[in-house]
């Protein structure tokens, strides 16, 4: 618990050694959690074939469990294992879950997500509590030093989240493997466990089985009053978390289908954009630290700032405004249509829907044929259709190109072992922009590829053949395969710029600072000392309730609705919550005056 004992001359004014182990361990653990979480929605919807509705449902239930289990974590630590051994013990299933989640099996997935939710949920309330206790025991009376430590601690969380949400989607995209991508967070979780365990002797002494005296009748009355008052605040905050967590899955789905994600010549992965949130958090906190340290005068820092209730009201209004920004982007984007995506090791070719659904294709004589209305014909060998994933795989094939039923001078794209055979496709890949007759869009990766004795270079959608500069074919123990699947597609000229989502992230991040940080502080102000721990647990529980009772029930709406209407619906609820907060804030102002 916190101490008001003044610091004595023999108390060091520097951070205790345990802080650095906690800082590094928390950075690695948050890198692990947010890296896994970043690619999970598309893994569920696309790779496992659950679709956006089921994928969103499973994802929101998983998030809910992650934020419901801190109640269990606090109980286990306080009554049985202590904080250190609770963290170490539950890190083992956490690491196991990180390695297992990438194996594409429904039962393994459920087991892995259960381990992950249990690991992060049980650990979450104990790390920050252990750090607070470490400062209370090893730096008694240095409240400002402890406060600075928590700011740095919060920075470590967001730096880890920013880096992982940037890096892990890149690993997934470049390797083409979710399993490899999930291994990156797993390695960081092992690193987190090692760093945390190494600092054991520098942490506070754990207190286990601490029995609190039963509350007096007066305390019982006070607790009921405070819980009644806080329940209204927490109910409204629950809606904020419901909107905030939309950014990690419905925004990802929207970015994938409706957005032009190219920034300065680089195409962002749809699940990479959410890294903006932790980046902005770090920028805001860092900017505030610089301002208070080097710019603001001591007199200005002593002046009372904006009332916490006013900050939260602005935060709720910004939450609604954020969804208005997304609604505008949704209405400006073009209509989606069904298309066929042919994926090779070199990238994707988007074609119109064939005359026969891929689920109805029946292989004959070792080959399968897809015919298109414009005369294009795709013939593949070693066809294998996975009904669960709604995706077909093949080893080799030939795409005969046509347009409007007319031959394209015999132009074909040959595919061998899941790769485009450029030496057999020379009529298509000639110098200049890639042009594939009949294709809706071509998205081939930049790089150098073998073309017989020459080298073909693809850069930003352009082709150049360098004669005599050969490049060797990659030596692979397991030959890759191509895949074919139905997707939702929007014309490139009808996609909205990714800067709409950047603006939405800026607005929701400011709202997060105003609601999350201020709201928890406000709850602490009105709560008696004996309820501080319970208030923290209830605050985390609001995130769980948001996903269980808001996001999970509406998970199936986004795929069925126009995205503009879906986001506008949430904006309307946001403004309603802001209005409801006005009388709630009045009650808090009265409570603060009494205190």
Image: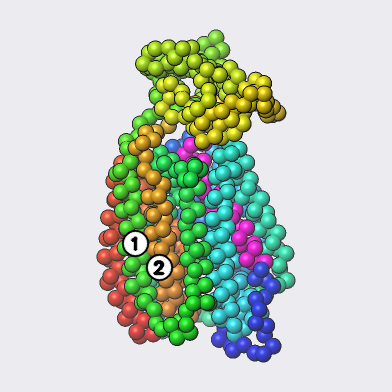
- Looking at the image, can residue 502 be seen? yes
- x then y, percent, for residue 156: 58, 63
The circle drawn on residue 556 is: none
- x then y, percent, for residue 305: 39, 79
Magenta-highlighted residues: 21-47
- Looking at the rendered image, the quarter that the C terminus falls into is bottom left
- Looking at the rendered image, the quarter that the N terminus falls into is bottom right
- Check disc 2: other Cα within 10 Å, few if <14, some if 14-19, many if 20+: many
- x then y, percent, for residue 214: 50, 80
Q: Is residue 90 above or below residue 419?
A: below
Q: Which residue is mark 1?
A: 318
Residue that protrudes farthest toward the front in the picture: 467
Q: Is residue 37 magenta?
A: yes
Q: Which residue is mark 2?
A: 514
- Using the rendered view, name the quadrant where residue 563 is placed: top left
Q: Earlier in the sequence, mark 2 or mark 1?
A: 1
Q: Are marks 2 and 1 in contact (CB under 8 Å)?
A: yes
Q: Secondary structure at mark 1?
A: helix
- Looking at the image, can residue 75 be seen? no
- Using the rendered view, name the quadrant where residue 338 is placed: top left
Left or right of 223 in this view: 476: right
Q: Residue at x 35, y 47 (%)?
A: 554
Left or right of 545 in this view: 384: right
Nearer the observer, 415 or 70? 415
Colour scheme = rainbow
């Amino acid at each position: 618990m916190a101490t008001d004992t003044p610091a004595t001359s023999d108390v060091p004014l520097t951070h205790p050694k345990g802080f650095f182990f906690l800082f590094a361990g928390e950075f690695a653990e948050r890198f692990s959690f947010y890296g896994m979480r970043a690619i999970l929605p598309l893994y569920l919807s696309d790779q496992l074939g659950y679709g956006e509705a089921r994928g969103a449902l499973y994802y929101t239930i998983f998030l809910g469990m992650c934020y419901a289990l801190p109640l269990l974590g606090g109980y286990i630590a306080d009554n049985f294992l202590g904080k250190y051994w609770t963290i170490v013990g539950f890190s083992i299933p956490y690491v196991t879950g990180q390695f297992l989640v990438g194996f594409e099996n429904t039962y393994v997935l459920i087991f892995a997500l259960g381990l992950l939710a249990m690991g992060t949920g049980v650990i979450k309330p104990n790390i920050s509590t252990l750090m607070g206790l470490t400062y209370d025991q090893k730096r008694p009376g240095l409240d400002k030093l402890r406060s600075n430590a928590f700011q740095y601690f919060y920075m470590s969380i967001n730096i880890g989240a920013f880096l992982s949400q940037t890096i892990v989607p890149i690993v997934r995209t470049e390797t083409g493997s979710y399993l490899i991508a999930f291994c990156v967070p797993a390695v960081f979780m092992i690193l987190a466990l090692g760093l945390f365990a190494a600092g054991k002797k520098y942490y506070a002494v754990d207190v286990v089985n601490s029995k609190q005296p039963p509350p007096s009748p007066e305390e019982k009355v006070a607790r009921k009053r405070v819980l009644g008052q806080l329940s209204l605040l927490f109910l409204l905050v629950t809606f904020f978390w419901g909107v905030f967590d939309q950014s990690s899955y419905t925004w990802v789905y929207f970015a994938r289908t409706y957005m032009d994600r190219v920034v300065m010549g680089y195409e962002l992965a749809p699940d990479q954009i959410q890294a903006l949130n932790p980046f902005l958090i770090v920028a805001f906190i860092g900017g505030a630290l610089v301002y208070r340290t080097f710019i603001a005068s001591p007199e200005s820092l002593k002046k009372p700032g904006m009332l916490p209730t006013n900050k939260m009201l602005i935060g709720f209004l910004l939450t609604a405004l954020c969804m208005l920004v997304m609604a505008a982007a949704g209405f400006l984007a073009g209509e989606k249509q069904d298309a066929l995506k042919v994926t090779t090791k070199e990238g994707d070719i988007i074609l119109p829907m064939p005359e026969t659904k891929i689920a109805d294709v029946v292989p004959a004589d070792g080959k399968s044929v897809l015919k298109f209305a414009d005369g294009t014909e795709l013939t593949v060998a070693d066809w294998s259709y996975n009904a669960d994933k709604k995706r077909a795989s093949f080893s080799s094939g030939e795409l005969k190109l046509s347009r409007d039923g007319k031959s394209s001078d015999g132009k074909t794209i040959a595919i061998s072992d899941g790769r485009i055979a450029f030496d057999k496709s020379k009529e298509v890949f000639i110098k200049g922009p890639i042009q594939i007759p009949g294709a809706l869009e071509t998205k081939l990766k930049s790089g150098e590829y073998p073309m017989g004795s020459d080298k073909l270079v693809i850069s930003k959608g352009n082709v150049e053949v360098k004669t005599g500069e050969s490049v060797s074919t990659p030596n692979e123990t397991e030959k890759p395969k191509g895949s074919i699947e139905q997707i939702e597609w929007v014309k490139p000229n009808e996609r909205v710029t990714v800067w709409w989502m950047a603006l939405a992230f800026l607005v929701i991040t400011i709202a997060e600072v105003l609601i999350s940080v201020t709201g928890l502080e406000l709850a602490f102000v009105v709560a008696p000392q004996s309820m501080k721990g319970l208030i923290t647990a209830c605050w985390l529980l609001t995130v769980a309730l948001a996903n269980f009772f808001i996001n999970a029930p509406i998970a199936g709406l986004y795929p069925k609705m126009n995205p503009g209407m879906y986001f506008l619906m949430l904006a309307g609820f946001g403004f309603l919550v802001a209005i409801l907060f006005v009388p709630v804030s009045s009650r808090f102002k009265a409570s603060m005056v009494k205190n």
